[in-house]
Amino acid sequence: MKQSGKMKVMAALLAGIMLLGSGFSMKEASAMEQNHGKTETQKKAVKIVQTAGRNQLGDFAPDFARYNDDILFGEVWSKNDVLSLHDRSIVTVSALIAQGITDSSLKYHIGEAKKNGVTKAEMAEIITQVGFYGGWPKAWAAFRYAKEVYAE
């Protein structure tokens, strides 16, 4: 990976961790970045289709299922022309670990991160970094899933 690629990954990780407790919205953070004169070539967004909400909760909690499938994945994750799926995965995994969400949803997102191009070495660095800022025991729990996912 080129140095600029590593810098983008680290910037995405840092931004995600900082946004967790800062009170800034993603819109505000984006505006702050634009004000510093940074411009990027517009990329084409890839539409994310998710059905897990409807499959698992459709009859029981149809509104929640719709928010999960259509809003979170269909809209937020589909804005990958602004923030790549690779970088969204890094932010998501970091946020889950920092909050102590070390259940099957973390394993799912580590798997998606792998599919989105996050390498084993990057994942090890991400979890190590979050361990210092989010909690050492949380990092240990995350490594259990990461080892499973990257062994597959």
Image (cartoon, rainbow, N blue to C red):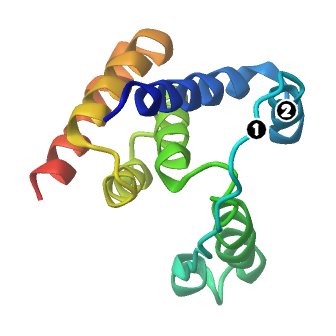
The image quarter containing residue 122 is: top left
* Looking at the image, residue 105 lies above or below residue 136: below
- Label 1 element class: loop
Q: Position of residue 50 (x, y in %)?
A: 56, 78
- What's the amino acid at mark 1? Thr
Specify whether 23 is left or right of 83: right
Cα separation, mark 2 vs mark 1, equals 7 Å
- Whether the residues at callouts 2 and 1 have beta carbons within 8 Å, the answer is yes
Q: How many marks?
A: 2
- Which residue is more in the foreground, 83 or 151? 83
- Which residue is more in the foreground, 1 or 137? 1
Q: Position of residue 47 (x, y in %)?
A: 62, 76
Residue at (55% x, 38% y) in the render: 91
* Looking at the image, residue 152 lies above or below residue 20: below
Specify whether 127 is left or right of 35: left
- Which residue is more in the foreground, 46 or 123? 46
- What's the amino acid at mark 2? Gln
User: Going from the N terminus, do you reach mark 2 or mark 1 first?
Assistant: 2
Specify whether 110 is left or right of 99: left
Residue at (38% x, 52% y) in the render: 113
The image quarter containing residue 57 is: bottom right
Of the 4 image quadrants, the one containing the C terminus is: bottom left
Q: Residue furthest left?
A: 151
Q: Position of residue 59 (x, y in %)?
A: 65, 90
Residue at (33% x, 61% y) in the render: 115
**Mark 1, residue position:** 39
- Label 2 element class: helix
Residue at (63% x, 48% y) in the render: 83
**Mark 2, residue position:** 34
